[in-house]
Every structure is written in C-alpha cells, then in structure tokens.
Image (cartoon, helix red, strand yellow):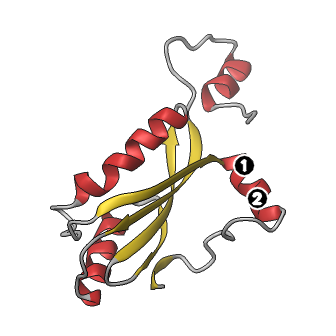
Amino acid sequence: MVSVDTEQRAESRTGAVAVGRDHARLWHITLSVAGKEAPLKEVRRSLEKLAYDHPFLLNSRYANDHAEIRYWEEARDLHDAAALALRLWGEHRTSAKLPPWEIVGLEVVGRETYHQRVAEGYGPPPAASMGIHPF
C-alpha cells in the first residue's frame, strides 16, 4: 500500500523533518467469536456497548452462540493490527459484559486489499448498514 502520512505532508509544506514516528495505516479487521449459547438480547446489548467503547466498529452480526465483528484498526503493520484485534474481545469482556466466548477466526487485510476485493466482487461489501444485526 502506498500512501503519504500526515508527517510527510507537513514536511513537504514546511520543509521540517519529522523524526521518530512510525507510519500508521488502516487495516480492515474481521473478528469471529463463538461459545456457549447466550440470550440474544444480552448478546446484542453487549455488542452495542462494545461499539460504544470502540468507535471504529463498523458492524456486528450475531447469533446466540457466535458473532462476527468488522471494524477498521489503525496500526503500524499487520502484526500490530492483529495483536490489537486479538486483545479486543478479552479487554472489553467485563466492561461490555460480553459472553465468555473464544476467538475462532481473525482476518486482517490492508485498506487497499479490502477495497480491491470489494471492487472485484469478492469478500463482504462495505458496511452500508452499519450497526448490530442478527445473522
């Protein structure tokens, strides 16, 4: 992915050299979780709280025993984006009252790859209906 970050744009305008900051990029995350059945109303309420706590959440789909969460994450590289995604469910389990499910799937793709897949008809379309929906 080729992009110009804000430091490079500022440097070109001012002639100043920025030192010591890593370039962050956007990554599209799909996190799948599953476990023992939980009441649908509680699952929905938990995912709504997670969306409030994590503002880049695009949408969630859920059933009483699994859920899929799609969102954008800003990170330096794929390794950092994946690490953040793998911590999301556990870090918000108590505050959002999430079910004690485990992560069963993770997909992390760069922004350009995501948009290329959508343009070619592969993968999920952009989240037009943002929010939390049943499967």
Return the x and y of residue 29 as percentages of the image width and height.
Answer: 52, 54
Q: Residue at x 69, y 54 (%)?
A: 114
Viewed as shown, does residue 52 lie left or right of 39? right
- Above or below, 8 against 121 in this view is above
* Residue 77 visible to the viewer: yes
Q: CA distance from mark 2 to mark 1?
A: 6 Å
Residue bearing mark 1: 113
Which residue lies most toward the right here? 120
Residue 52 point in image, percent of width and height: 33, 67
Which element carries disc 1, helix, strand or loop?
A: helix
- Callout 2–callout 1 Cβ contact below 8 Å: yes
Residue type, label 1: Thr
Is residue 54 at least partly visible in the picture? no
Res 67 → quadrant? bottom left
- Residue hosting label 2: 117
Residue found 63% across the figure and 12% down from its top: 16
Q: Residue at x 49, y 13 (%)?
A: 20
Q: At numbered mark 2, what does the secondary structure look like: helix, strand or loop?
A: helix
When asked about the image quadrant of residue 17, the answer is top right
Q: Nearer the viewer, residue 120 or 2?
A: 120
